[in-house]
Image (cartoon, helix red, strand yellow):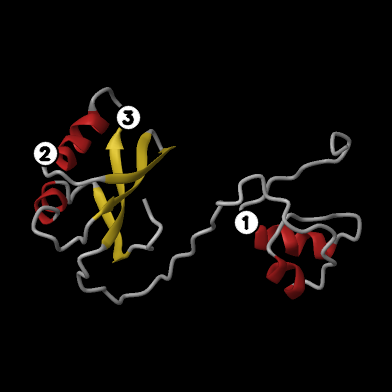
Amino acid sequence: GLDEIEHIPVESTAKAAKLAREDEDAAALCPSVAAKINNLPIRFENVEDDINNKTRFFIISNFENQPSGADKTSILARLSNEPGSLVNFLNDFEKANVNLTKIKSHIVEGKSIFFLEFNGHKDDAEIRPILEKNKDVIKVLGSYVKEADDI
């Protein structure tokens, strides 16, 4: 079994592969392309426990996509860490009938940082007022055409 093996969590599969390359007694769970780049032997394939698991990559640029009618937008919201701050923020989306598809939270320096995704483009008529009203607490990461199998 794997109980006697030391597990070392790292921030990415690319870093895991690089660390495994530097230690001949180490191994990494990583995509085959990461194994090839790092000259690692592939010992096992298809080890995922969820065949629908996907890793998403973002392209960072100054380019702004035009609305396509089938978009998704990602934002960061920095809200006070007190009762009601999140629900008050989310109410604006509900009132505008905007579907939130992802919410992840982290506490940074006593503030709640939320990563949110929602259906629609940042320039859509129903979304612009939400972003304008909350401009002091949000950072728009971007709008992009959503994948065909996105929820």
Task: Identify residue for label 3.
Answer: 81
> Mark 1 or mark 3, which is nearer the start of the sequence?
1
Identify the secondary structure beneath mark 2. Answer: helix
Question: Which mark is nearer the camera, 3 or 2?
Answer: 2
Task: Identify residue for label 1.
Answer: 12
Of the residues shown, which amino acid type is indicated by label 1?
Ser
Of the residues shown, which amino acid type is indicated by label 3?
Asn
Does residue 114 appear left or right of residue 5 in this picture?
left
The residue under the point 61% across, 52% down is 11
In this picture, is 58 found above or below 126?
below
In this picture, is 146 found above or below 88?
below
Question: Which mark is nearer the camera, 3 or 1?
Answer: 1
Kindly check if marks 1 and 2 are in contact, taking CB atoms under 8 A apart as contact: no
> Mark 2 or mark 1, which is nearer the start of the sequence?
1
Residue 95's mark? 2
* Alpha-carbon span between mark 1 and mark 2: 37 Å
Does residue 22 appear left or right of residue 61 in this picture?
right
In this picture, is 10 found above or below 89?
below
* Alpha-carbon span between mark 3 and mark 2: 23 Å
Identify the secondary structure beneath mark 1. Answer: loop
On-image quarter of the N terminus = top right
Q: Nearer the viewer, residue 109 or 146?
A: 146
* Alpha-carbon span between mark 3 and mark 1: 28 Å
Mark 3 nearby-residue class (10 Å; few <14, some 14–19, many ≥20): some
> Mark 2 or mark 3, which is nearer the start of the sequence?
3
